Each structure stands twice: as structure tokens, then as C-alpha cells.
Image (cartoon, helix red, strand yellow):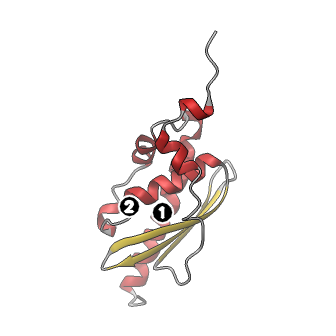
Amino acid sequence: MTEKFDFWNDHSETFLEMAYLWERRKPLNNPDGYGRKTGDCGDTITIYLAIENDTIISLNFQLDGCIHTNACCNGLAVLVEGKKTEDCWQVKPEDVIDFLQTLPEDHYHCAELATGAFYLALSDYEEKRKAGNL
């Protein structure tokens, strides 16, 4: 018989902190980058980027989804804030999963959804920049 998973004691402190952090869950007016993606699970993430000198100053988001998706969005923000946009294309779902330490395998798709919405926001930023709209 396998032991039952104890949510509060078996998750990493990092996962729990990211899962219950709400400060970034708000839209930005006139974001430099915007991306929205809905996953097969039905969760929807909208990412808003504030960027200065090609450096991500903040990543905010809104979501209609589970606590695991919230953890992935916050973890992604920690990984990319303060980094150059060109370097952020290297951030993969596995990086978010590794950062959170205890994201359940059946929720790895949440990390994929978060990074997918993020890539859309990065693309939006690059298009605006090339068009001279920033």
C-alpha cells in the first residue's frame, strides 16, 4: 500500500509559496507584451509583460485555472524577471517544473501552458518593437 500524498507536508516550500502567491495576478495597462493561451485542460492564462531596455521588469498574469497553474505562472515570473528578452526564449516548461520541485506529473501541462502563453507575449513584444510601437 502506498502512502497518501500530504499536500502541505510533501510539497516543497517553493511550490507552496508559488501556488498561493497572488501579487502578480493582475493585468497591466498597455503591456509591452501580451499573450493568451488556453490549454486542453480548459485553463486559460493571460500574460502581461513590462519591459525596459529589452529586460523583463515584471510578468503579471490572469488565469482561469487551478492552483498548479498559478504556481507555474509565478515560478515562470521568478525565472524571467530581470532577464533579457532574448535569453528568455531559452526558458522551457522543464525549468518551471524543476524550480517548483514538487509539481505533480499530471500537472506538467500547466508548466507547458504557462510557457506557451509567455512565448506569445514575447512574440507580441518583438512585433511591437519591430513596428516601432514601443
Q: Are marks 2 and 1 in contact (CB under 8 Å)?
A: yes
Q: Quadrant of residue 44?
A: bottom right
Residue in the picture at 59% in, 53% down: 70
Residue in the picture at 32% in, 76% down: 54
Amino acid residing under circle 2: Val
Q: Quadrant of the N terminus?
A: top right
- Vertical side of 4 occupied by 113: above or below: below
Residue 107 in the image: state x and y as whole percent.
Answer: 58, 40
User: Residue most toward the bottom?
Assistant: 132
Residue in the picture at 55% in, 53% down: 113
Determine crowd level at label 2: few under 14, some 14-19, many 20+ residues with C-alpha closer than 10 A: many
* Label 2: element kind: helix
Q: Quadrant of residue 84?
A: bottom left
Q: Earlier in the sequence, mark 2 or mark 1?
A: 2
Residue 108 in the image: state x and y as whole percent.
Answer: 53, 41
**Image-based side of 23 in relation to 56, left or right:** right
Tell me the CA gap for discs 2 and 1: 10 Å
**Image-based side of 57 in relation to 118, left or right:** left
Q: Front-most of 3 and 80?
A: 3
Residue in the picture at 30% in, 80% down: 53
Q: Front-most of 25 and 39?
A: 25
Residue 128 in the image: state x and y as whole percent.
Answer: 43, 83
User: Residue most toward the top?
Assistant: 1
Amino acid residing under circle 1: Phe
- Vertical side of 133 occupied by 7: above or below: above
Label 1 belongs to which residue?
118
**Image-based side of 78 in relation to 73, left or right:** left
Label 2 belongs to which residue?
80
Q: Nearer the viewer, mark 2 or mark 1?
A: 2
Residue 32 in the image: state x and y as whole percent.
Answer: 45, 79
Q: Which mark is residue 13?
A: none
* Label 1: element kind: helix
